[in-house]
Image (cartoon, rainbow, N blue to C red):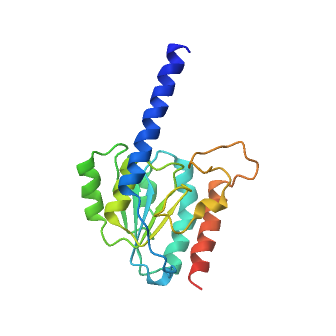
Amino acid sequence: MSFHNLKKALIHSKDSLRHLISRLRYDFETSEEKLNIKELKQAVIHRADGKLGDAICFMPFIRELKRFAPDCRIIILSNKSTAEIYQSADFIDEVILFPKKPKNNETDAFADRLKGTDLYIHLFDTLKGRHLRLISRMHPKWVATLDRSLKCDNLKIHQYTACIDDSGNSDEKYSDCLHMTDLLFKMAQSLILCDR
């Protein structure tokens, strides 16, 4: 085995171990209560990445969420490069800049600030320990992620895309993989149908 391959294997092993420890520490059972979208008081959508196209694709979904839950305070966790797009939307109540790699005390401060969140949506393929720590400390009633292995994910939107495998990893080779806009459409349908 070459040094490069050995280094790669060690990094992968370290990441897998950290991933496992994070799940053991922070994953939790969430509510089995049926989602009532009209009773949502606060929703947090975590999109702290730099993808401009995804931010634009998210806007119709967020607008629909606000339309069906007009009294719900919608907060976006974003990075600097996409924050301006979210801030320009009148149906988004607050945009919070979330660092790419926050320290534990920063994550805890964000969680304390976001206490009282009913719905937490996190649309990344794999949640890092810092994301799980945030969700665990916020303790929302409903959680939607693309990660199949989480106990706290009670809305199970990963079922709408074949891109995410059982480990929560993305695989673009699947032909039936939904595009982000289609995934959001399915998710909006699911949230609205949960209410009936």
Q: Is residue 186 left or right of residue 15?
A: right
For the C terminus, the quadrant is bottom right
Query: Residue 167 at x, y = what percent?
Result: 57, 48
Residue 38 seen in this snapshot: yes
In the figure, 185 relative to 81: above or below? below
Give the farthest residue toward the top: 2
Whole-percent x, y for residue 132 in the image = 39, 54
User: Is residue 126 rendered to the left or right of residue 161?
Assistant: left
Q: Residue at x 44, y 70 (%)?
A: 30
Quadrant position of residue 110: bottom left
Q: Nearer the viewer, residue 41 or 5?
A: 5
Q: Which residue of the protein is positioned furthest toward the right in this rendering?
A: 175
73 lies above or below 149: below
Q: Residue at x 43, y 40 (%)?
A: 17
- Please tell me whether residue 32 is drawn above or below residue 143 in the rendered image: below
Q: Residue 79: tell me if it is visible.
A: no
Q: Nearer the viewer, residue 193 or 2?
A: 2
Q: Residue at x 72, y 42 (%)?
A: 173
- The quarter of the image holding the N terminus is top right
Quarter occupied by residue 60: bottom right
Residue found 68% across the figure and 55% down from its top: 178
Residue 193 image offset from top left, x and y in percent:
61, 79
Counting labels gives 0
Q: Is residue 7 left or right of residue 191?
A: left
